Image (spheres, rainbow, N blue to C red):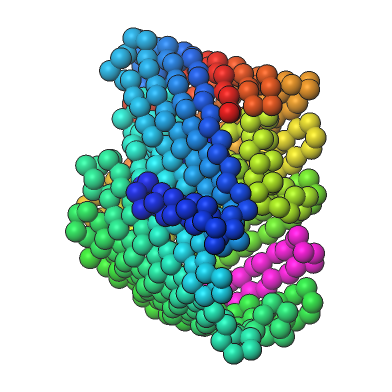
């Protein structure tokens, strides 16, 4: 698997842009450095004693067979790069043939630029199967056939005009168009997002001081004819105190208009803080400030060593569900491993190959533990804490993730399509996950993961807790073939008896790359 397939996106224009980048790479004028096509297939069979994750598992067990051909394309060149990963997932059940399904899953992104780098374009597209509500059963993968799973498609296109102004000035103008399309809620969550950003900066990271201005305007139009708008104008000043310490300052104004047209948050904002960078691979950034919704605190701690990587972040922002289903995904295991491997593997293409190999060889999950998204048309205040730690050696890989997120709906009156916010205007999700893969023999790896999560709907006094435990053995048959035996236990407890369920499943698979 190349990236986590749970971020949602439409294939259309993004895939077309990726295809265009591939064509540019193949042209003589682009002098493409390389295009690599890797087809593959996975065949699996297994049994789940609660396929639909219903409160009473009696009679819901079934055997299943999955056939999933895939294609991974990576292309690089001096002026363009593209990545396309596609899976056709076919799932058949022995008894419940009404649950048989076939889904196309896609992740693609592309970048192209002119020789002068004055003009560039970024594109991305995803198609995925996602849990769209926290109140429904939380399927771990497609073998669970629940009504809470929906196909979410997004695509994004972003042209950028950038250049130098004077000796040390830099200017950038970026337009972004993004579409989210979901079959959930009868299409009520479908949206078009248009954003324009402009930046002007003076000075560099090595300068005694640097200053800049930035403005943006963003509008999200929903299928229900509602709109959510945000805009701001900011000035920043960064002062170098000494070679490893900078003083960071920001001030400006912002405004948020909600989808229900029932409220507005606007006013001034400011922040001040420091960035300490004792080494090129370690840094700490802390700031305090105030925004129209109240005091703000931000934290970003990074420590990087040759075989480990740790990052702790906390931030507050006003956002929408459409943004949290954004591109690219920020919690996928592949991206985290690529960052972990960066000090020892500077070449991006090779680093990506090694990260793919680690996921397959060590039996690692496709994504780290993270706050679960849900679809809604409401604007909300998002307070998020995340801590991630990764360690890799010649025989083992360990990943740890901890998170705590509070989402508070800001609309005075909840808009149509409020979804989970309709039952609770304040929703808290927290949890932790750990994954460990150990190579016990030249071709054999044992892997296990444990994820704990909690959903707190404070307005209705409902608390749901979910435990996911997996244990597997992975045998490398050849450099491109792997067999796996996996066991999973999924358990959810709740103050609402109708939301609790228990599942045990076993799965045997064989995968081959060509």
Res. 327 in view:
no
Residue 99: horizontal and vertical position, in percent? Answer: 31, 20
Q: Is residue 99 magenta?
A: no
Please tell me which residue is depicted at 63% across the width and 22% down the height of the picture.
482
Please tell me which residue is depicted at 68% across the width and 59% down the height of the picture.
301
Question: With 497 as the anchor, is 280 left or right in this view?
Answer: right
In the picture as drawn, the residue positioned furthest to the left comes out as: 225
Q: Quadrant of the N terminus?
A: top right
Residue 246: horizontal and vertical position, in percent? Answer: 71, 77
Question: With 311 as the anchor, is 315 left or right in this view?
Answer: left
Q: Main secondary structure of the magenta part?
A: strand
Res. 250 in view:
yes
Please tell me which residue is depicted at 49% across the width and 40% down the height of the picture.
85
Front-most of 125 and 383? 125
Front-most of 291 and 49? 49
Q: Quadrant of residue 495?
A: top left
Residue 382: horizontal and vertical position, in percent? Answer: 45, 57
Relative vertical location of residue 494 with respect to residue 180 in this rendering, above or below: above
Relative vertical location of residue 59 with respect to residue 435 in this rendering, above or below: above
Front-most of 426 and 48? 48
In the picture as drawn, the residue positioned furthest to the bottom comes out as: 166
Question: With 227 as the anchor, is 289 left or right in this view?
Answer: right
Relative vertical location of residue 204 with respect to residue 392 in this rendering, above or below: below
Q: Is residue 275 magenta?
A: yes
Residue range corresponding to the magenta coloring: 269-291
Please tell me which residue is depicted at 19% across the width and 59% down the height of the picture.
225
Q: Quadrant of residue 8?
A: top left
Residue 397: horizontal and vertical position, in percent? Answer: 72, 35
């Amino acid at each position: 698997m190349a990236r986590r397939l749970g971020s949602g996106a439409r294939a259309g224009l993004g895939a077309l842009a990726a295809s265009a980048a591939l064509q540019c790479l193949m042209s003589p004028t682009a002098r493409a450095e390389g295009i690599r096509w890797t087809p593959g297939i996975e065949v699996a069979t297994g049994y789940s004693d609660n396929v639909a994750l219903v409160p009473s598992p009696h009679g819901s067990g079934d055997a299943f067979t999955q056939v999933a051909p895939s294609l991974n394309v990576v292309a690089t060149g001096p002026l363009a790069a593209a990545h396309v990963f596609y899976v056709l997932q076919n799932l058949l059940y022995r008894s419940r043939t009404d649950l048989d399904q076939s889904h196309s899953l896609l992740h693609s992104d592309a970048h192209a630029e002119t020789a002068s780098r004055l003009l560039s374009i970024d594109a991305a597209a995803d198609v995925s199967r996602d849990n769209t509500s926290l109140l429904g059963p939380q399927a771990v993968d497609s073998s669970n056939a629940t009504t809470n799973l929906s196909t979410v498609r997004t695509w994004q296109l972003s042209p950028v005009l950038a250049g130098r102004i004077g000796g040390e000035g830099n200017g950038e103008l970026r337009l972004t168009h993004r579409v989210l399309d979901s079959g959930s809620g009868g299409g009520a969550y479908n949206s078009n997002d248009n954003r324009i950003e402009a930046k002007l900066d003076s000075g560099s990271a090595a300068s005694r001081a640097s200053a800049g201005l930035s403005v943006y305007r963003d509008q999200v139009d929903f299928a229900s004819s509602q709109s959510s708008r945000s805009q701001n104008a900011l000035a920043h000043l960064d002062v170098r105190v000494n070679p490893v310490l900078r003083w960071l300052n920001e001030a400006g104004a912002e405004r948020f208009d909600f989808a229900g047209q029932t409220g507005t948050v606007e006013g001034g904002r400011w922040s001040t803080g420091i960035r300490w960078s004792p080494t090129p691979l370690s840094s700490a950034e802390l700031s305090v400030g105030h925004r129209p919704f109240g005091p703000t605190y931000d934290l970003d701690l990074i420590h990087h060593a040759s075989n480990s990587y740790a990052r702790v972040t906390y931030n507050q922002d006003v956002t929408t569900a459409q943004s949290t289903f954004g591109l690219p995904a920020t919690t996928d295991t592949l991206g985290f491993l690529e960052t972990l491997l960066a000090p020892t593997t500077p070449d991006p293409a090779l680093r990506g190959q090694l990260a793919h190999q680690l996921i397959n060889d060590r039996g690692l999950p496709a994504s780290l533990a993270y706050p679960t998204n849900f679809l809604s048309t409401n604007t909300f205040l998002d307070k998020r804490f995340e801590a991630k730690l990764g360690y890799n050696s010649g025989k083992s890989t360990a990943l740890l993730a901890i998170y705590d997120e509070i989402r508070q709906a800001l609309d005075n009156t909840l808009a149509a399509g409020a979804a989970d916010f309709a039952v609770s205007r304040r929703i808290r999700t927290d949890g932790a996950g750990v994954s460990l893969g150990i190579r016990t023999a030249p071709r054999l790896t044992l892997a296990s993961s444990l994820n704990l999560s909690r959903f707190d709907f404070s307005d209705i006094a409902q608390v749901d807790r979910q435990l996911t435990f997996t244990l597997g053995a992975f045998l490398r048959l050849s450099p491109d073939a792997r067999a796996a035996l996996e066991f999973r236990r999924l358990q959810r407890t709740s103050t609402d008896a109708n939301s609790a369920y228990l599942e045990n499943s076993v799965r045997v698979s064989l995968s081959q790359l060509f």
